[in-house]
Amino acid sequence: MKKKKRTRKKGMFAPTNTVTFTKWLPDNFPVEGVMCGCGRHFKTPTSLLDHLRRKSATARKSLKLLKKNV
């Protein structure tokens, strides 16, 4: 049987956190870079965001980002 698409609930209330992750990350990106839980190292916030965009929704929920120790 084919699954029915659920209607997406649009937010009724304004979120308390108005800053999005894409805006927050470049400002708070560590100088030494970030390491993803899968073992990839990232030196720029854009490369990290592109990597996160390619991951599945379930993988994003259990994501671990670590500061890269030099």
Image: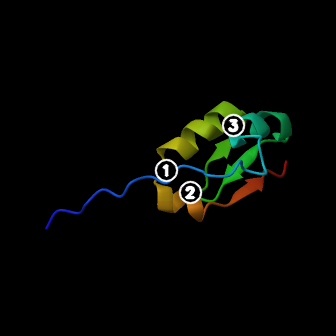
Residue sitting at 61 percent across and 55 percent down? 39
Nearest to the observer: residue 2 or residue 40: 2
Q: Is residue 49 above or below residue 14?
A: above
Mark number, residue 12:
none
Residue 31 in sight in this render? no
Amino acid type, residue under disc 2 in the picture? Arg
Q: Secondary structure at mark 2?
A: helix
Q: Earlier in the sequence, mark 3 or mark 2?
A: 3
> Which residue carries the number 2 mark?
60
Nearest to the observer: residue 27 or residue 42: 27
Amino acid type, residue under disc 3 in the picture? Thr
Q: Earlier in the sequence, mark 3 or mark 1?
A: 3
Q: Secondary structure at mark 1?
A: loop
Which quarter of the picture shows residue 5? bottom left
> Which residue carries the number 1 mark?
55
Q: Residues within 10 Å of mark 2 (few under 14, many from 20)?
A: few
Q: Residues within 10 Å of mark 3 (few under 14, many from 20)?
A: few
Q: Is residue 62 above or below residue 69?
A: below
Judge from the rendering whether residue 61 lies leftward or rightward of residue 17; answer left or right: left
Q: Earlier in the sequence, mark 1 or mark 2?
A: 1
Nearest to the observer: residue 55 or residue 35: 55
Judge from the rendering whether residue 37 lies leftward or rightward of residue 19; answer left or right: left
Residue sitting at 78 percent across and 48 percent down? 17
> Which residue carries the number 3 mark?
22
Amino acid type, residue under disc 1 in the picture? Lys
Circle 3/circle 1 CB separation < 8 Å:
no
The mark lying in front, picked from 3 and 1, is 3
Quadrant location, the N terminus: bottom left
